[in-house]
Image (cartoon, rainbow, N blue to C red):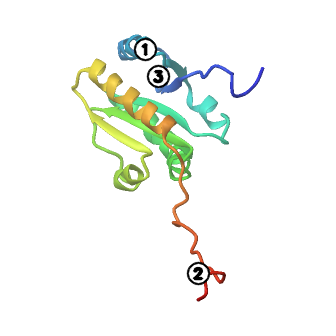
Amino acid sequence: MNEENAPVINYIFYLQTKNELDNSYHILAEVLSKINISLLPISADDLKVIDRNKKHHLISIRNDFSSAFNFNQMRKSFLDTAMAAGKIALFDISSFSEIENAAKFQNKNMYRYFQLPQNLKQVAMTVAVDYFRDRNSQVEWPGGRRAKLPSMTNET
């Protein structure tokens, strides 16, 4: 099958900070599935070995101390490095404060923070808009246009 004709599979990873999935996962998955985005739960070990040649989108929910502790452990081991390299875009839904380097990652569009309590359906819609905006954006060369020399044939 041609790569141009291949169907595009839209997916966002859901970072599992606990052994069981929260009710918030099911709410987010239901809303995102209506927009043709699959929400895939992934553990920290699986996230470390995932394909690093392309950019991945990740949702993390920190609503208690154990999930916040596990999230901070993941940040120390690999998550901050992956965001700095532009390989992971993180949507952080949390009742805790933003991460320390939030401004640096937000400037690169690698981090988006949502303060809990908030309606998860609205958060899911915002995540979907950001996801499609990021997927459809054209990468432009940051250096500008090449200078052109004046033509030598138009001498009078």
Could you tell which of marks 1 and 3 lies nearer the N-terminus? 3
2 vs 1, front mark: 2
Could you tell which of marks 2 and 1 lies nearer the N-terminus? 1
* Quarter of image, res 63: top left
Decide: is 107 above or below 64: below
- Front one among 146 and 3: 146
Q: Amino acid at mark 2?
A: Pro
Where does label 1 land, which residue?
A: 29
Task: Please tell me which residue is depicted at 50% across the width and 47% down the height of the picture.
Answer: 83
Decide: is 144 above or below 84: below
- Dot 3: few (<14), some (14–19), or many (≥20) neighbours within 10 Å? few
Where does label 2 land, which residue?
A: 150
Q: Secondary structure at mark 2?
A: loop
- Residue 77 lies, in percent from the top left, at 55, 45
Question: Taking 68 as reference, is 121 left or right?
Answer: left
Q: Secondary structure at mark 1?
A: helix
Q: CA distance from mark 2 to mark 3?
A: 64 Å
Inspect this view and state whether residue 61 appears. Answer: no
- Residue 104 lies, in percent from the top left, at 39, 56
Decide: is 144 above or below 31: below
Instruction: Confirm or deny contact between disc 2 and disc 1 (CB under 8 A).
Output: no
Task: Please tell me which residue is depicted at 50% across the width and 33% down the height of the picture.
Answer: 57
- Front one among 12 and 138: 138
- Dot 1: few (<14), some (14–19), or many (≥20) neighbours within 10 Å? many
Where does label 3 land, which residue?
A: 18
